[in-house]
Image (spheres, grey):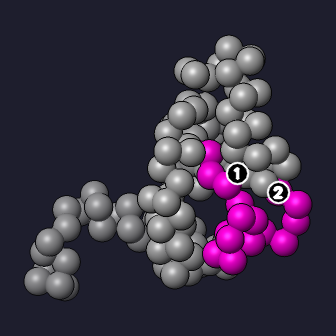
């Protein structure tokens, strides 16, 4: 295993293992992670605008659109989701990313 995992630090391997377990517990796969990363790259400008912290672990939440493509179907009427990359906390919203952003700005919690 030393050679197989030589490219990564123990910390990174441990984090990957945690992600793997969490994915299994939530019925998701690394394919879902790949889709998430692609969606994240596509929507970089959309979620970069706002800053909210995770109520679970305090990390910065990201705001992503959902139900706007075949890869982001949630099976409900959500339009966006706040996601924590630290602990995988998720909070879905029926507001669009733009509406969420606007609401945050009005409340004074956002930056823009
Ligand atoms: Zn978190």
- The percent position of residue 50, horizontal first and vertical second, equals 57, 32
Q: Quadrant of residue 15?
A: bottom left
- Judging depth in this view, the residue of 78 and 58 nearest the camera is 78
Q: Are marks 2 and 1 in contact (CB under 8 Å)?
A: yes
Residue 36 visible somewhere in the drawing: yes
Residue hosting label 1: 81
- Judging depth in this view, the residue of 83 and 98 nearest the camera is 98
Residue hosting label 2: 78
- Separation of residues labelled 2 and 1 (CA atoms): 8 Å
Q: Which region of the structure is painted magenta? A: 62-78
Question: Does residue 110 lie above or below 73 as drawn?
Answer: above
Q: Is residue 86 magenta?
A: no
- The percent position of residue 55, horizontal first and vertical second, equals 66, 35
Q: Residue at x 30, y 67 (%)?
A: 13
Q: State the residue lying farthest toward the right.
A: 77
For mark 1, give the secondary structure. strand
Q: Residue at x 73, y 51 (%)?
A: 80
Q: Is residue 64 magenta?
A: yes
């Amino acid at each position: 295993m030393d050679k197989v995992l030589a490219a990564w630090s123990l910390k990174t391997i441990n984090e990957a293992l945690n992600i793997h377990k969490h994915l299994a517990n939530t019925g998701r796969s690394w394919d879902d992670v790949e889709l998430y990363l692609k969606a994240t790259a596509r929507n970089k400008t959309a979620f970069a605008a706002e800053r909210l912290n995770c109520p679970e672990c305090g990390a910065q939440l990201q705001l992503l659109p959902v139900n706007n493509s075949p890869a982001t179907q949630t099976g409900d009427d959500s339009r966006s989701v706040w996601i924590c990359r630290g602990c995988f906390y998720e909070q879905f919203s029926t507001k669009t990313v733009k509406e969420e952003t606007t609401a945050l700005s009005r409340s004074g919690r956002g930056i823009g």
